Image (cartoon, rainbow, N blue to C red):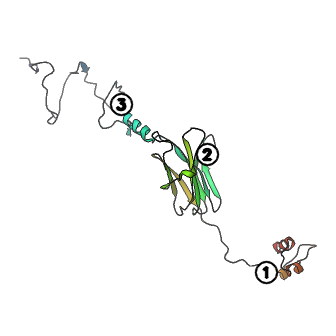
Amino acid sequence: MATRFLVPRNSGEGGIGRSYKAWAEGYFDNLNIGGLDFAPDQNVRTDDSVTFLSGNFEQELRFNNLRVATLQDVKDQTTEGTNKFIYFSDAQDNLGVSNKTYYETPDPEKFLSGISVATAEDMKFTIQWDGPNAYYTGSASINGQTIPAENVRELGEDTRRFEGFIDHVNITGQETITAEANGRQFILPIVELGLGPVPTNIYIDSISNATPKPENSLALHILSKGTLSMFLLNSILTM
């Protein structure tokens, strides 16, 4: 005797299982859902290429373990200004010489990638950033210190791209400095090389022990008058 069909009283009524009490497994030779036929080999596998006309992913969608941004993500990023750009355009050591490196850009000295200084005790940092959507300028900071309005200027006319700086920053002992603007962040590496040798005592021997340059004298009579002439200075340098 053939197995009867299990059908509802009317089309579109009833169901099998509940959302809170589902069947553990199900096996079908053929399956039709809403007029769409699913063949036995229509399970989605890791090596399948799948095209979706539409879909609703309540949690998230990933490809190669990378999270795919949703339309809401893009909307939030645009609204918050997090898709804008920020970078360090300059850094200076107020107490000495700075050695700067840059990323490759059309302007070779525009986008700082790192800086080396003797000491980071007194620094000046300059950053550039884009204004957010909700406000004209937004806000920017360096190591958590807000850049004062008087230190900010707009680059070009009506570009909403800004440059600002903070001077006399002490970051001794730190390996990086962080810039933030309107939800974006950029970290610049810093290398402190340390101060060079510092003299503890400077001694100049008596002028009477010096050897003058040929055809020159030590000009002791000028020294005795309390006047140190360039001629005398040159004589000292030849000792």
Q: Residues within 10 Å of mark 1 (few under 14, many from 20)?
A: few
Name the one closer to the observer, 221 or 239. 221
Residue at image coords 50%, 52%: 141
Q: Residues within 10 Å of mark 2 (few under 14, many from 20)?
A: some
Q: Position of residue 36 (x, y in %)?
A: 25, 19
Above or below for 202 versus 168: below
From the viewer's perspective, is 86 left or right of 46? right
Amino acid on which disc 1 is placed = Asp
Mark 3 or 2, which is nearer the eye?
A: 2
Amino acid on which disc 2 is placed = Lys
Mark 1 or 2, which is nearer the eye?
A: 2
User: How far apart in space, not on screen, are marks 1 and 2 (Cα)?
Assistant: 50 Å
Which residue is identified by label 3? 47
Residue 64 in view here? no
- Secondary structure at numbered mark 1: loop
Amino acid on which disc 3 is placed = Asp
Q: Where is residue 2 in the image (x, y as percent from the top left)?
A: 8, 17
Which residue is identified by label 1? 205
Q: In which quarter of the image is residue 73?
A: top left
Residue at image coords 13%, 28%: 16
- The quadrant of the picture occupied by the N terminus is top left
Between disc 3 and disc 1, whose residue precedes?
A: 3
Q: Where is residue 80 in the image (x, y as percent from the top left)?
A: 43, 41
User: How far apart in space, not on screen, are marks 3 and 2 (Cα)?
Assistant: 45 Å
Residue at image coords 61%, 56%: 92
- Secondary structure at numbered mark 3: loop
- The quadrant of the picture occupied by the C terminus is bottom right
Label for residue 110?
A: 2
